[in-house]
Amino acid sequence: MIVEGASLATEPPSEGFKRRGFEYARAFQNRTAEWARASDSEPVGVLRAPTGAGKTATFHEVIEQNALTLVVYPTNALLNQQAERFEEEGVNIARLSADSLSGHGDERVENLLQLTDRFAGHDIVVTNPDILQAVIQHMYRGATKPMQFFDRFDAVIYDEFHFYDDLAASGLLLQIQIFLDRRAGMDVLLASATPNESFVSFIDEELSVPTRDLSVEYDEGGDRFRQEVIVTRHEEASINDHREAVGMRLQELINEAEEMSEPQVALVFNSVAASNDFHTYLQEEFADVFEYTAKDNGFDTNDPDAQLEDETFFILNTTSKGEVGLDYDIRTLFMETPATPRSFLQRFGRAGRQHEATVHVYGLKEMSWPDRLDYPSFVETVYEGLGGGRTPAQDHATLRALIGLRAAYAIHTRIEDTEWFGEELREDFESATEYDKWAAFIRSVTTAVDGVGEFGHPVTNNSVTHKLLAFTEHCFEALRGLRGRSLSINVRYPRGDRLALTTYDLLTTLRYYDIDEITDNETIAVSRRESDQPVMISARFPGYENRPLNYGGSHREVRETFESWIRPEIAEADLGAADVSEGLLNHFYEAVDLPDVVQPVEVRHGQHVVYVDSDGGGPPSVRVERRRI
């Protein structure tokens, strides 16, 4: 099938684009500039622009109209890439990430606020949303002072806002609400090639904040931004199922290439394990191809010796990490079909931006595509064919609950603080959707758990009720972070050309790799398991230390195991005696994705056991030992 190229409507440039040397502007770029300049415009602009359409150029219009703008990127890799582009264009920026903050406690808070000082000469601050959420959820010392962060900006831009799942999206929505409540006239721009429309409709319908649609306008006679793409569908479910043929085609592309100093080929896998496997395969079977290939997936993020910006390569091996910020001129793309249409279009959009391209798709179910299809129609068929199963009403119900839980927990964790002043922070959080009921729920659970052991308390130490409520209180802690919990550990693994040292989630690693040895208490050396079939990984959790849960399957399978486990516990518990609402407890476990919010206290796999200590107040520490069997 051929997906035709696409063009966008153009106009004479607005004043800002004209000053920057634009001969013309795309219509949506002018509309965004008009929104940014209007004093009475809607508070939130929603920029819907396909990959390569030029949405980043519009950010300058927002920056120019405001004294200090916050630009939020979903990953630090994208943050650093875009920061360099701003600097090249003469924008004065400050980078704000965990690495750029120094000191501890009060010193760290002062450093945070200094980076956002509007008198320091910065035009923008670039950051990730995790920093903002840490401020909201009381991860920095001081009940009120860190929240001054939200007073410092005139505008905020959230780029690639489709990137977040429900838990993270609820954090962004709470951030947006606080920005708008704290600063009159605040402009919020949401930008994405594939927007999460439930997120947008939530702002309109649930937060009652007007939004401005800033979508592209297609015009066959306009400015070409996409070239023709040949789509080849393969019967194989994955690239590795077709790896010899793929390796041979990569060799042909290298032989045909006139210039190999810039990446022109990309492979996008659904898992880091599959990406790592293919990298190793190339090293073993296609040495010439391997020489011109760089790998950048989740395993490489924390590998100090794998910095993509320092490499010259022709072929990029990546995962969902490459769905955002991959701005190369990709002419041949091999991609596995992801779970959502947004991810599919993000991957597909990386090819055909400057030159005609070929896209090889693996694992795609039958689609009713004609021989030729215009690009807007292609996008529509992908959404129809790969659409999710939930309705917007279900999405809104989940987001309402998660926002209410986050806001309630933000107050709950501050009440015991010596600097608690109450009213200013209450204004930030108590207006959040469903705040009251979730504040009462959190209070009832923690009160019941805290009272266990006291004379006459209706909940006894070893009862089903106590175990369930202790486990629930443990889950609340996930609300402190934006994206839930992971259990990071130092991992030394075979990368193909070398043994690489990185940091990655333990439970995900153990699904694909076996522990060979413990190089020290916090570093494991692993080797790839021959089969991807589920293995026996048992995990124990607070409240249920004596009841291990099988953690060897996929994320979906683990979630289903949790679901079948937690519902009978709720039914058996005496929640009335604990003064905890059974309905709200069930609602809580409907809203959260349990594998994302729990953290084991112990993990066993094969000959090894991992002990987890979360009592230090910071990231959990792990200790790995060989089991005595």
Image (spheres, rainbow, N blue to C red):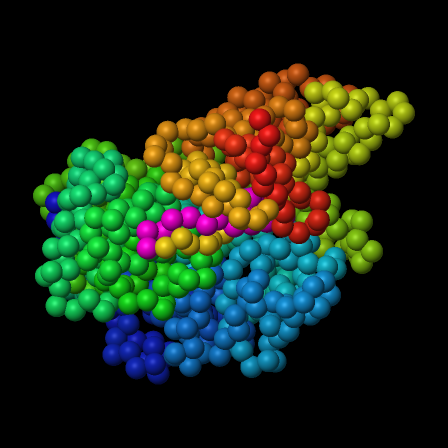
Q: Residue at x 37, y 55 (%)?
A: 498
Q: How many marks?
A: 0
The residue closer to the viewer here, 453 or 364, is: 453
Where residue 199 appears, as percent x and y from the top left, is: 46, 47
The quarter of the picture where the C terminus appears is top right
Residue at the right extreme of this rendering: 455
Where residue 18 appears, as percent x and y from the top left, is: 32, 80
- Residue 162 falls left or right of residue 507: left
The residue closer to the viewer here, 230 or 204, is: 230
* Residue 609 appears anywhere in the view: yes
The quarter of the picture where the N terminus appears is top left
The residue closer to the viewer here, 140 or 12, is: 140
Q: Residue at x 56, y 22 (%)?
A: 565
Where residue 471 appears, as percent x and y from the top left, is: 66, 31
* Residue 155 appears anywhere in the view: no
Q: Is 484 within the magenta?
A: yes
- Residue 501 falls left or right of residue 530: right
Q: Is 420 within the magenta?
A: no
Where residue 299 appears, as percent x and y from the top left, is: 42, 51
The residue closer to the viewer here, 518 or 220, is: 518
- Residue 231 falls left or right of residue 162: left
- Residue 484 falls left or right of residue 18: right
Q: Residue at x 66, y 28 (%)?
A: 545
Q: Residue at x 78, y 49 (%)?
A: 415
In the depicted structure, whether residue 24 falls above or below residue 48? below
Find residue 24 and report its image quarter.
bottom left
In the depicted structure, whether residue 337 falls above or below residue 291? above
Find residue 146 and report its image quarter.
bottom right
The segment highlighted magenta reads 478-497
